[in-house]
Amino acid sequence: MNTYTYLEGDGTKMQLYVRSMGKLLAVTALCNSDQEANKYMENHKDEGVVATGAGLVFLANLYDHGTKAELPMNTDKTRILTS
């Protein structure tokens, strides 16, 4: 699993992505446990788990088809958090 942050402009807008199957999926929520993720998903029916790692559960919209992962690793716009 690779996760990326994307900073836009002055850095006030940040989006976390999970790289999976050659695509970048926008992370919509981070949870600290399976139980927390399940509770979150009960109230957000269009969300699902896309990855786990570093003690976290990463969720994304079920209808997000992702963006082709053409961003190179370790540029000024991407940074690997975990792998």
Image: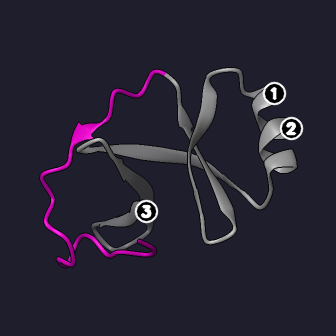
Name which residue type carries label 3. Answer: Met
Q: Which residue is mark 1?
A: 43
Residue at disc 3, secondary structure: strand
Hey, which quadrant is residue 32 in on the image? bottom right
Is the residue marked by circle 1 packed among few (<14), some (14-19), or many (20+) residues within 10 Å? Answer: few
Contact between marks 1 and 2 (CB within 8 A): the answer is: yes
70 within the magenta span:
yes
Q: Residue at x 82, y 27 (%)?
A: 42
Report the span colored magenta.
63-83
The type of colouring in the image is one colour
Element marked by disc 2: helix
Q: Which residue is mark 2?
A: 39
Say left or right for 80 vs 46: left
Question: What main secondary structure does the magenta stretch of the protein show?
Answer: loop
**What distance separates the C-alpha of mark 1 from that of mark 2?**
7 Å
- Percent position of residue 59, x then y: 60, 43
Q: Is residue 47 left or right of residue 80?
A: right
Pick the quarter of the image with the N terminus: bottom left
In the rendered structure, which amino acid carries the disc numbered 1?
Answer: Asn
Single out the mark in the foreground, 2 or 3.
Answer: 2
Give the labeled residue for mark 3: 14
Q: Is residue 13 left or right of residue 53?
A: left
Query: Which residue sits at x=41%, y=53%?
Result: 18
Q: How many other residues sit within 10 Å of disc 3, few (<14), some (14-19) or many (≥20)? A: few
* Mark 2 to mark 3 CA distance (whole Å): 25 Å
Q: CA distance from mark 1 to mark 3?
A: 24 Å
Q: If you read the primary sequence from the N terminus, does the residue marked by circle 1 or circle 3 appear first?
A: 3
Choose top left, top right, bottom left or bottom right for residue 37: top right
